[in-house]
Image: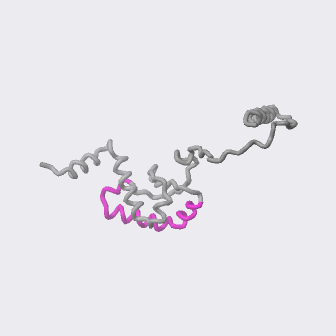
Amino acid sequence: MKHISFTISHIKQQPLFKKMEQTASHRKLLTLLPPRYQSMVKFMYNKNNTLFFVLKHPAFKTEFNYKTTLIKGLLKKLVKLDESCKCIDAEELKFFVTNKMEQDAAVEIKSEYIYEERSNGDFVNKACNKKLNLLFEEIREIIKKNG
């Protein structure tokens, strides 16, 4: 009877599961980086012989730009030592920060504090722009409801 690890490795070699093999190789490369740099990476992916690192903060991009040679060296050694990591071999490395917010960060934070409205909504709306005028009127209505 075959061992389960043999079966799983055979399944991973199928073209259908190439992304799964790449993801495992990305994780291996990430574990080779110092812990400080590991925490800076959101995820990685390969495209057109380039390995892209998606970082969590714009300041981390400069850190990674300085360490490009280190990462390239680690990548080359990983590919030499581990046959399964040949799928992530890349000649170029690119680092960037995505402009999409994480779902956890996008959740609206509700305040526990409740403040009394100090205004009574009596103010002159001098906005010439129609959109701004409407916004001020909406604000006036909100103030009158809460006051």
Residue drawn at (46%, 55%) of the image: 51
Q: In which quarter of the image is the C terminus?
A: top right
Q: In this view, does 131 lie above or below 1?
A: above
Residue 128 x %, y %: 86, 34
Residue 134 x %, y %: 78, 32
22 on left or right of 120:
left
In terms of secondary structure, what is the magenta stretch mainly? helix
The foreground one among 45 and 89 is 45
The foreground one among 108 and 82 is 108
Provide the residue span drawn in magenta: 59-87
Residue drawn at (35%, 56%) of the image: 86
45 on left or right of 61:
left
The foreground one among 22 and 105 is 105
The image quadrant that residue 141 belongs to is: top right
Magenta segment: does it hold 134?
A: no
Residue 110 x %, y %: 60, 45
64 on left or right of 132:
left
The image quadrant that residue 31 belongs to is: bottom left
Residue 32 x %, y %: 40, 65
The foreground one among 24 and 102 is 102
Residue drawn at (81%, 31%) of the image: 130
33 on left or right of 135:
left
| Colour setting | one colour
Residue drawn at (53%, 55%) of the image: 56
Q: Is residue 147 above or below residue 111?
A: above
Q: Which residue lies furthest to the left in this view?
A: 1
